Amino acid sequence: MNDDFIFTSESVTTGHPDKLCDQVSDGIVDHFLKQDPHSSIVAECAVSSGVMFISAHYASQAKLDIPDIARQVIRGVGYPKGVFDADACTIMTSFMDHTASEYRPFDLEHMDDADIGLITAKHQVTVFGYACDQTPALMPLPIWLAHRLADVLDSPKVQKKLPYLLPDGKSQVGIEFHNGQPSRIHSITLVASQTDADAAAPEELRNDLIDQVVGPALKGEKFKPDDKTQIFVNPEGPLIGGGPAAHSGLTGRKTGIDSYGEYARHSGAALSGKDPLRIDRVGAYAARYAAKNVVAAGLAKECEVQLSYSIGASRPVSLRVRSFGSGPTDDKTLKDRVAQVIDFRLGAIVRDLQLQKLPAAGHEDGFYQRLAVYGHMGRTDLDVPWERTDKANDLK
């Protein structure tokens, strides 16, 4: 804990091509689960200038027009037609319907403990969950602030005040740590695309983003820029156009942004585009749930939970808890308490966190699609079950 260093994390907005693909993939997952909560679905997406490719393997009773879902998502992102036209772009698809051979609905609410144990992982993965006391959401400060900046940059309010901005943008925050704890904001970088070179001069863009994005995003935060904080706006010059017209996108390519901003370990597996019975997705949520409850209980200032699953096993073959010497309780005791309080079997995770039912119960944009930008972890703006701290008292 006596480290002095600078750590940076980045986030991106809804119009970034990778995040467009994540939103399309999760939009498809949402639509399947709204019609049929027992759906098995894996959807992947790739996008380039004027073209989107979607691959989907599913077993479900739902009936969907998948290209239409994709066009709805593209339309919602808000690209001008000259950048990416939701109605005119080419959408290529490759679908595999496995319903006849693989559709097996599980009534998790009425299954007994033995039956829950028969729901096994179909993939092998090691996932990590992390939490720390750097922010009220128990997230690392660099990624927390980077998401705040990207969210405000992408907001309707900013888009209205600065109509020359396009929905493709990036943020990066560098935090200076002293003795292992955040001490100040070292640097802020914003990259924003615009309609054309004459829309805003570099100095105008800089002033606009500092006034309309940096100030509002950090209002109420403990750490704010000081007179030594370096603020960069489009440091390589104007970005004209952006979006798929400028660079391609792919589902699952922003896993660090989706989790802890590379401050902590993650599995490397994509989170978006997978139904709740995919252990590489929901295992990551369960690990975060456990780590956050350990920190919320005051048992550690930071905590990492590692879960390893093997094909054909219902529960993790390995559970490891590390507190990095940051609390009064040793790691073995923490591991034993976590294992006693939280059921990490695949069926139990899906049942206890209600993961199959969330799309039908939530926002008109679905549930998982809204997770596809600004991170899957630390989402205090959504009622995300793995962000609850309802196990803290039990862990004490």
Image: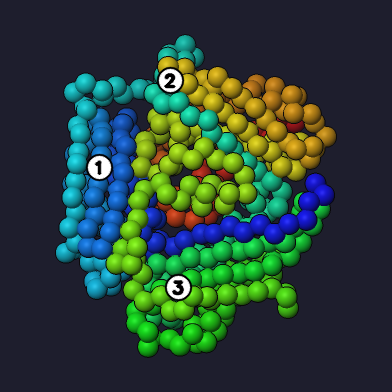
The residue singled out by tag 1 in the image is 55
**Residue occupying the far front of the picture:** 236
Q: With respect to residue 95, does 332 lie above or below?
A: above
Tell me the crowding category of disc 1: few under 14, some 14 to 19, or many 20 or more residues within 10 angstroms, Cα based. Answer: some
Q: Read off the residue under disc 3.
A: 192
Instruction: Tell me what residue is drawn at x 65 percent, y 37 percent.
Output: 304
- Residue 336: % across, % down: 70, 22
Find the distance from the CA under tag 3 to the CA under tag 1: 30 Å
Depth order, front residue of 175/327: 175
Give the image location of residue 324, x and y in percent: 75, 38
Residue at x 42% of width, y 71% of height: 156
Say few, some or many: other residues with alpha carbon within 10 Å of mark 3 (under 14 / 14 to 19 / 20 or more).
many
Q: Secondary structure at mark 1?
A: strand
Mark earlier in primary sequence (1, 2): 1
- Crowding near pointer 2: few (<14 within 10 Å), some, many (20+)? few
**CB under 8 Å between discs 1 and 2:** no
* Quarter of the view holding residue 288: top right
36 relative to 200 in the view: left or right: left
Residue 161 lies, with reference to residue 216, above or below; the image says below
Q: Which mark is residue 38?
A: none
First of labels 2, 3 by sequence position: 3
The Cα atoms of the two marked residues, 2 and 3, are separated by 43 Å
Q: Nearer the viewer, residue 359 or 335?
A: 335
Please say if 42 is above or below 11: above
Residue 279 picture location, percent across and down? 45, 30
What type is the residue that disc 3 sits on?
Answer: Ala
Q: Residue furthest top?
A: 114
Three-letter amino acid code of the residue under disc 1: Ser
Tag shown at residue 311: 2
